[in-house]
Image: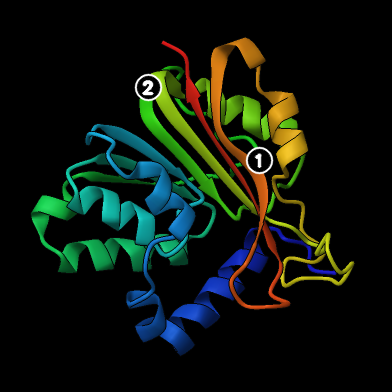
């Protein structure tokens, strides 16, 4: 079982960048993300666990100012380089932060959009959700997506087997109900059969 520590993620991202840089460069933003941000006015966003930066770059290219946080220096360097290729109007809108989401805490009430996609949680899911939710400004959007480690329909392990990712029940239990309007809170099977199920939680903070 992998340790999922910083060395693990550095090895993973080094391999990905060295062997699949072209694939990463052309990977589109997440479909759940695109659905959640459709129609939102550009403002301030937090991409917690930004990885290779597809969502961060999309946001910056559409006028958002983004704080992009990841554990891996390699992932951040790759994403930063991709932003620079797109020019200063994009790269100048992004603040890249090396941080461990096991303890990194955003400024309270700062962001109109907070996203956290497919992050392995090295601790309590509820505690992570609490910290990220605190960063959402009144009227802002919180989007959490987790890859279920076991497919609930088949009982088979998925590519996220062994990881602790956000689930619908844990996320909703961690959010104070009278502070949030729930847009989506459900498990959604992935398009390719046998590739698993995503837990999607899209909520809006009450003003």
User: Residue at (39%, 19%) from the top-left corner?
Assistant: 139
Which picture quadrant has residue 31? bottom left
Whether residue 110 is visible to the viewer of this picture, yes or no, is yes
Residue 196: name its quadrant. Answer: bottom right
**In terms of secondary structure, where does tag 1 sit?**
loop
Q: Position of residue 101 (x, y in %)?
A: 59, 42
Up-down relation of residue 13 to residue 91 (above or below):
below
Label of residue 194 in the image: none
- Disc 2 from disc 1: Cα separation: 20 Å
Query: Mark 1 packing: few (<14 Cα in 10 Å), some, or many (20+)?
Result: some
Q: Which residue is outermost to the bottom?
A: 19
**Is 83 placed left or right of 97 in the picture?**
left
Quadrant of residue 163 within the rendered picture: bottom right
The picture places residue 54, in percent across and down from the top left corner, at 36, 62
192 sits to left or right of 63: right
Q: How many marks?
A: 2
User: Residue 114, relative to residue 35: is it above or below?
Assistant: above
Q: Nearer the viewer, residue 143 or 24?
A: 143
Please name which of the two marks, 2 or 1, marks the residue nearer to the observer: 2
CB under 8 Å between callouts 2 and 1?
no
Q: Is residue 130 left or right of residue 194?
A: left
Q: Quadrant of the C terminus?
A: top left
Report which residue position mark 1 lands on.
102
Say which label, 2 or 1, has the lower sequence index. 1
Residue at 22 percent of width and 36 percent of height:
42
Given residues 65 and 185, the one toward you in this image is 185
Question: Residue 51 vs residue 80: left or right?
Answer: right
Pick the front one: 147 or 1: 147
Figure check: 161 above or below 60: below
Dot 2: what SS?
A: loop
Q: Position of residue 92 (x, y in %)?
A: 16, 47
Q: Quadrant of the N terminus?
A: bottom right
């Amino acid at each position: 079982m992998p340790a999922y520590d910083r060395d693990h993620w550095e090895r993973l991202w080094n391999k990905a960048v060295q062997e699949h840089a072209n694939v990463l460069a052309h990977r589109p933003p997440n479909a759940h993300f695109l659905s959640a941000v459709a129609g939102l006015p550009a403002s301030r966003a937090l991409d917690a666990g930004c990885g290779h930066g597809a969502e961060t770059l999309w946001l910056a290219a559409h006028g958002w100012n983004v704080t992009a946080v990841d554990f891996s220096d390699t992932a951040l360097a790759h994403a930063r380089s991709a932003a620079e290729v797109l020019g200063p109007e994009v790269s100048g809108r992004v603040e890249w932060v090396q941080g461990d989401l096991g303890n990194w805490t955003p400024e309270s009430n700062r962001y109109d959009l907070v996203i956290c996609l497919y992050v392995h949680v090295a601790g309590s899911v509820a505690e992570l959700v609490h910290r990220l939710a605190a960063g959402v400004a009144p009227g802002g959007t919180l989007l959490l997506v987790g890859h279920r480690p076991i497919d609930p329909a088949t009982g088979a392990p998925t590519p996220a087997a062994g990881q602790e990712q956000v689930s619908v029940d844990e996320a909703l239990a961690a959010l104070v109900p009278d502070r949030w309007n729930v847009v989506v809170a459900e498990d959604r099977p992935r398009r390719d059969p046998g590739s698993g199920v995503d837990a999607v939680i899209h909520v809006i903070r009450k003003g």
